[in-house]
Image (spheres, helix red, strand yellow):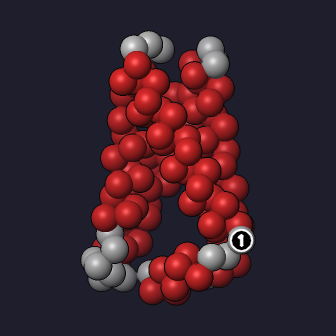
Amino acid sequence: MNAVEWVVVTVTIVANLAIAVADLVAAEFVLANSAEVEVPRSWLPWLGLLKMLGSAGLLLGLLGVPVVGVAAAVGLVCFYVGAVVAHLRARVLGNIAFPGGYLALAVASLFVALSW
């Protein structure tokens, strides 16, 4: 794995851990966004847990368990496709760049993971 691939996956891990923590502590911006896209507050801990698991799986992929890394990347891609769809369904386009950015990181990590 070259340095660029390592950086892409590491940034994806860190970004997902950061937003997972925000979900788990019910940060104000998370509460506002979830209300805007009609995601129940009770889902936030589960969504945060999924993001943490995706990060852990990517880390395992970096550490030499490629099948787990690929599975984690696929899971994160699916997760963020769902997030983008939720924004589109609710017609909340003002901040769609955030789930779109996470989706881009997940897709990039998937491409890297497929090369492991």
Image spot of residue 87 (x, y percent): 37, 74
**Residue 30 visible in rendering:** yes
Q: Is residue 94 or residue 80 the one in the foreground?
A: 94
65 up-or-down from 30: above or below:
above
Question: What amino acid is found at the position of numbered circle 1 in the picture?
Answer: Val
Image spot of residue 71 (x, y percent): 56, 32
Q: Quadrant of residue 58?
A: top right
52 up-or-down from 43: above or below:
above
> Viewed as shown, does residue 44 lie left or right of 38?
right
Image spot of residue 5 (x, y percent): 40, 24
Q: Residue at x 31, y 64 (%)?
A: 97
Q: Quadrant of residue 47?
A: bottom right
Q: Residue at x 61, y 50 (%)?
A: 17
Q: Quadrant of residue 56?
A: top right
Q: Residue at x 41, y 33 (%)?
A: 8
115 up-or-down from 35: above or below:
above
Which residue in the protein does label 1 denote?
A: 25
**Residue 34 visible in rendering:** no
Q: Residues within 10 Å of mark 1 (few under 14, many from 20)?
A: some
